[in-house]
Each structure stands twice: as structure tokens, then as C-alpha cells.
Image (cartoon, rainbow, N blue to C red):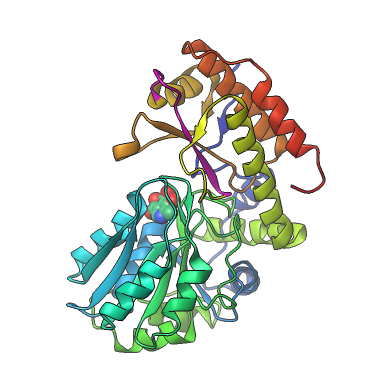
Amino acid sequence: MDKYYLLAPGPTPVPPEVLQKMAEPIIHHRAPAYEKVLEEVREGLKYLFQTKNEVLIFASSGTGAMEGAVTNTLCAGDKALVVEGGKFGERWANICKAYGVRAQVLPVEWGQGMDPAAIGQALQADPSIKAVFTQATETSTGVLYPIKEIAEIVAEYPGTIMVVDAISHLGAVELPMDAWKLDIVVAGSQKALMLPPGLAFAALSDKAWEFVGKSTLPKFYFDFKKELKNLKQNQSAYTPAVSLVMGLAESLRMIRKEGLENVIARHAKLAKATREAMLALGLKLYAPQAYSNAVTAVVAPPGVDGQKVVKILRDKHNLTIAGGQDQAKGKIFRIANLGYVDKFDVIMAIAAVEMTLKELGYDVEMGKGVKAAMEILIKDRS
Ligand SMILES: Cc1ncc(COP(=O)(O)O)c(C=O)c1O
């Protein structure tokens, strides 16, 4: 029998309730039934993003909304500051480059946290910087950036916006958009939103919308102004991903029912259990201090290839996690607890990692990681 388990940092498992919604007959997107769904979705997204403003929805992967965040707020030749401590930081820099935005990279050592003071120094040295681009969780390293502190600094500069890629973060780790004065927050469907890939989201502050008014970079599908106008009438500029939006209505209902605070606490507890389990097995965390509760990056033990851990888990045990990329390739493996994940999913993943490490010749005391995790998970609060 083949039974599959998905604990990658995206795509993530989709709850049966959501799958069922998406299997319903297609409704027409210019009909009142769809408008009603979208009206509910708009409210649910505002709750999730913790913003009073509208959250735009696009039929694309998350990168589409990242691209839109650049093309809707900047002009060719503008300068931007990019926090780059992993693969997705690089993506911001690459998008800027593609559109003739001059990206000044703020390098962060992979696996390490960042000092928000570095943002202050860069902005002080060059106040012409129009945007700061960062991740909230850098998925490739499992690092959490100090978003609240960075945003406080950026908020002092009226000519600069704070743009956060929260694709692997929103709905898993705290990120109150308005309270933290974030100017753009970008998300994707296939992570903590418990949906298949295919939807991208972008929410903008009033300050960011002022930038939109002045931006001259080319844009067509990802035209934020046009999409906002349509969204306000429960419409989209182009044919929406109807089934995904219907699924989204359901997943947002589930998040509201559990309560965002509880959802975030669940992710915190599952991530803590994962970390404690790995430490109990004698392994090291790739981000020992600045870890995110969305995904746990673990250093493969000496003599064990991290890619092999991922391969054996997938091919022999039908359990998918992620490996390392670029400079972390072979050195780490990443276990996510994003979205529709509960305590027994985590226990199962840890058990599978223990078996795999044993198979690869690493001397683990089987059950030691599972026990450490269970001791966290049995508590009411982490
Ligand atoms: C932090 C982060 N940014 C961007 C992306 C890219 O998103 P997508 O593959 O949906 O375009 C991902 C996907 O893993 C991510 O984790």
C-alpha cells in the first residue's frame, strides 16, 4: 500500500473540507454566487493579514505577487534595499534586476539572523532607497527575520516602503500587517493557507498605494490598481481561479474557526517539538537562534548526505520533506509544519527521520526524538 505524507515547506497538505469545496461544479465568475464567495473571502483575508485594506488575489504562484510588488510601486532606476540570506532573498534581487531597479543587497549569512540596525544604517547612508525587500521567513534556511523591528525603522522614512515576502510565513507565524506598519505583504496559497498552489496575494498599506500612483514600471496582468477596482466590486480583472477561490473561502473559514492566535500557537508548538526532537537525536539546527516556526532546517550529521535523507524518506517511506539549496545542498534537510499539520504528523515525520538516519548508518537511539517531541506536544501550551 502506498500512503503519502507531505511535510515540505510547500506545497502542503490540503484538508478534506477544502478539497471537497474545490471539487464542486464551477460557478461563473461574473455571477452573484461567485461574488458572494469573493465577498466572504475579502473579509477572511483581511482577518488573516490583520489589515483594514483589501488583499489582492492573483492566479499565479507567489512569485507573481512579488513581481507585482516591485512593478507597481517603483520606477526604472529606483534604488531598493534587498535583505539576502537565502534563495528567496535572491529572488527579490533578481526581480529588481529584471525591471531595471537598482538593488543594493544586504547580505545575511545563511542560517543566521539579521540585525535590524543594518537597515537603519543603509537608509541613513542613502535616503533615496525607495523600498526595503525582505522575507519574513526565509524558507531556504528556516530563518526568521526581525520584521517588526525593521518596519519600525523603515516607517521613519516617508520615501521608503517596507515590502515583506510572507509566502511561507503568513498564517503560521505572527505578522500583524497594520500594527507593525508593513507596507506590502505578499503570500501564496500553497503554504499555511492549506490550499494547492495557484493563488498569490498582496496587501498594501495606504503609504504603498501612494507609491502605486507614482510607479511607472511596466505591468499588465499584475496591475494592482486595476485589480483593486475590480475586487471592491467582488470581481477580478480577468478570469479567476474559481475552484481555488472556493477552496480559499473554506480554508479561511477553518482559520477563523480555530482563531488566528491558536493557529499561530499550534505552529509554534509543532516547530518546537521538531526542534527538540532533532536536538535530542544529537543533530544541530541550521538556524539555532533565529529559527522560524514555519519550517525547521536541520544540519545533516557528519558523514550523512542531507539529500539522501530526503531521497530515502521520499522513495522508501513516502514522506516528503525538503533538502538544502545551493550552498546548503546536501548539508541540511528541512521539515515543515505548515498549514494542515497536527501533532501526529510531526511525530510521524520525526519517526521517519530516525529510521532514515539509522538506515544511513547514523547511530540514533530510535524513539529518542519522538519522545522529546511528545513531551512538548502533550503540554497544553508550548
Ligand atoms: C519565502 C518564499 N518566497 C517565495 C517563494 C516562491 O513562491 P512560489 O513558488 O509560489 O512562486 C517561496 C516558495 O517556496 C517562499 O517560501
Residue 192 position (above or below residue 6): below
Residue 94 position (above or below residue 77): above
Residue 172 position by quadrant: bottom right
Residue at 67% across / 57% down in the picture? 250
Residue 225 position by quadrant: bottom left
Residue 2: tell me if it is visible.
no
Residue 188: tell me if it is visible.
yes
- Asked if residue 228 lies left or right of residue 7, the reply is left
Give how far across and how far down residue 331 sits, in percent. Answer: 38, 30
Q: Which one is in front, 170 or 228?
A: 170
Give how far across and how far down residue 139 sits, in percent. Answer: 44, 48
Residue at 59% across / 50% down in the picture? 194
Q: Is 294 covered by the magenta stretch?
A: yes
Give how far across and how far down residue 44 sits, in percent. Answer: 65, 69
Residue 95 position (above or below residue 85): below
- Asked if residue 76 lies left or right of residue 302, the reply is left
Q: Main secondary structure of the magenta part?
A: loop
Residue at 61% across / 48% down in the picture? 339
Residue 306 position by quadrant: top left
Residue 27 position (above or below residue 290): below
Residue at 50% across / 53% down in the picture? 168
Give how far across and how far down residue 130 sits, in percent. Answer: 30, 80
- State how many labels appear: 0
Q: Which one is in front, 290 or 311?
A: 290
Q: Is 264 covered by the magenta stretch?
A: no
Q: Which residues are magenta?
A: 293-305
**Which quarter of the rendered picture does the N terminus lie within?**
top right
Q: Which one is in front, 307 or 339?
A: 307
